[in-house]
């Protein structure tokens, strides 16, 4: 295993907050990039205060900000802005997810940045895009879940629900991350630094592709069915005799016949006209669910899983988060590492999901607010006395 990482030597400067942009830059840091996170003096990224559950730090912030350097800087002050300009002159990538219009007011639009720094790759993460009729609207994760129609698909027949994690932010962060990697490759092969733009709305809109096609071509959207699948049956979670939910999925007629014979113990069901094809099973979902639920109620969850595994039907217990944390795949594949958090404590953190053979992801500490300010300003030639003067004036 080599200590060399794919993005060693790449410097990223970020004016970021909350989830989407920090998720993108954390993944760049995982690959070896130096990520300098510019934070407001007096508190920093507001995601630091979402909660205090991880040894006094926010669970969101700990997840999103390992391996970064924190610089406390007021970029609205001309002295702070001079520091930012010096950093950008040395950087490869600039990532921001500021409020609508803020980058332009600060003179940090992609056009201005590329004119001043031709090799710099600006990456802008916005809510609804930097142009168009909604460019000036604020956008948070759940608002975007609502606007893309995701909330209307999630939940049960009687009530819609948000997705349990910040899917719009995560989607935008993933596309910003891959967009920056693409722009770095393009710069390396052509010499041209191309700006990257991602919006939360358009990122989640891409993930809505299947229900969008379904709705456009049937005239009706997929129904809300909890864990059930709108176009496949049986597919969903059922409660076993011990109260544990087990989810399983039938994907083809071979699996359906095996389920009828070996699990439901009624081979004739396989040819029953109500259930003989996938569309028929969907049409008679309620009748089928009654049969499946009655069979589940006669067996403990471990027995249900054992039978379904034996006959080749994909299944899984519906885990709590606590059960996920102790999952045998994570321990068996050595996916956990220790990461330091502000205050001196250490927490377990998962390795990035993409393994690159022969290299190890960087799993560095989560920074305290402004932790690296003095060192970074020293790199830029500021004396300790100059740094203290800036601090006294609230610039850092």
Image (cartoon, helix red, strand yellow):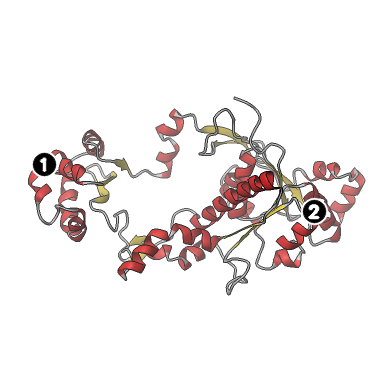
Task: Please rate how many residues cluster around mark 1, counting C-alpha atoms within 10 Å: few if below 14, some from 14 to 19, many from 20.
Answer: few
Work out whether 57 lies above or below 340.
below
Taking the view exactly as shown, the residue that stands out farthest to the bottom is 133
Question: Is residue 227 among the parts visible in the rendering?
Answer: yes
Give the side of residue 59 with respect to residue 301, left or right.
Answer: right
Q: Which residue is mark 1?
A: 265
Question: Is residue 19 among the parts visible in the rendering?
Answer: no
Which mark identifies residue 84? Answer: 2
Toward the viewer: 225 or 271? 271
**Cβ atoms at labels 1 and 2 below 8 Å apart:** no
Taking the view exactly as shown, the residue that stands out farthest to the top is 1
Question: What x and y, as percent, mark residue 246?
Answer: 28, 44
Taking the view exactly as shown, the residue that stands out farthest to the front is 190
Give the side of residue 229 with respect to residue 257, left or right.
Answer: right
Q: What residue appears at the point 76 percent right and 51 percent down from the top-left corner?
A: 72
Question: What x and y, as percent, mark residue 216?
Answer: 36, 68
Quarter of image, res 361: top right
Work out whether 143 lies above or below 11.
below
Sequence order check, earlier mark of 1 and 2? 2
Q: Secondary structure at mark 1?
A: loop
Q: Secondary structure at mark 2?
A: helix
Question: What x and y, as percent, mark residue 217?
Answer: 33, 67
Quarter of image, res 326: top left
Toward the viewer: 179 or 393? 179
Give the side of residue 122 with respect to residue 267, left or right.
Answer: right
Work out whether 187 lies above or below 143.
above
Q: Quadrant of the N terminus?
A: top right
Work out whether 146 lies above or below 194.
below
Q: What residue appears at the point 14 percent right and 44 percent down from the top-left corner?
A: 260
Toward the viewer: 233 or 70? 233
């Amino acid at each position: 295993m080599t200590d060399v990482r794919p993005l060693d030597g790449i410097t990223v400067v970020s004016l970021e907050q909350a989830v989407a942009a920090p998720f993108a830059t954390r993944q760049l840091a995982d690959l070896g990039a130096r990520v300098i996170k510019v934070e407001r003096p007096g508190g920093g990224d507001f995601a630091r205060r979402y909660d205090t559950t991880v040894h006094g730090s926010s669970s969101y912030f700990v997840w999103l900000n390992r391996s970064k350097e924190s610089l406390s800087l007021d970029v609205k002050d001309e002295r702070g802005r001079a520091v930012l300009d010096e950093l950008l002159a040395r950087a490869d990538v600039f990532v921001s997810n500021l409020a609508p219009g803020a980058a332009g007011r600060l003179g940090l639009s992609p056009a201005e940045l590329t004119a001043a720094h031709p090799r710099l790759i600006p990456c802008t993460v916005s809510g609804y895009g930097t142009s168009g009729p909604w460019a000036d609207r604020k956008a948070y994760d759940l608002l975007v879940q609502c606007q893309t129609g995701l909330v209307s698909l999630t939940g049960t027949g009687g009530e819609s629900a948000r997705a349990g994690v910040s899917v719009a932010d995560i989607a935008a962060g993933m596309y910003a991350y891959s967009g920056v990697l693409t722009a770095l490759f393009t710069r390396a092969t052509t010499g041209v630094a191309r700006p990257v733009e991602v919006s939360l709305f358009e990122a989640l809109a891409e993930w809505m592709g299947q229900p969008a096609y379904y709705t456009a071509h049937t005239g009706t959207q997929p129904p809300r069915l909890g864990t059930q699948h709108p176009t496949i049956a049986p597919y969903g979670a059922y409660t076993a005799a011990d109260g544990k939910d087990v989810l399983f999925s039938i994907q083809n007629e071979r699996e359906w016949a095996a389920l009828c014979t070996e699990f439901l113990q009624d081979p004739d069901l396989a040819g029953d006209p109500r259930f003989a094809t996938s569309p028929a099973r969907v049409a008679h979902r309620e009748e089928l669910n009654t049969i499946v639920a009655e069979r589940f109620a006669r067996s403990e969850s471990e027995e249900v899983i054992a039978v379904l595994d034996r006959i080749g039907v994909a299944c899984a217990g519906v885990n709590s988060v606590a059960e996920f944390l102790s999952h045998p795949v994570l321990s068996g594949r050595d996916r956990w590492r220790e990461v330091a958090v502000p205050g001196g404590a250490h927490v377990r953190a998962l390795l990035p999901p993409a393994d690159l053979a022969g290299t190890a992801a960087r799993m560095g500490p989560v920074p305290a607010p402004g932790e690296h300010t003095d060192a970074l300003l020293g790199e830029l030639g500021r004396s300790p006395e100059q740094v203290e003067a800036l601090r006294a004036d609230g610039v850092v």
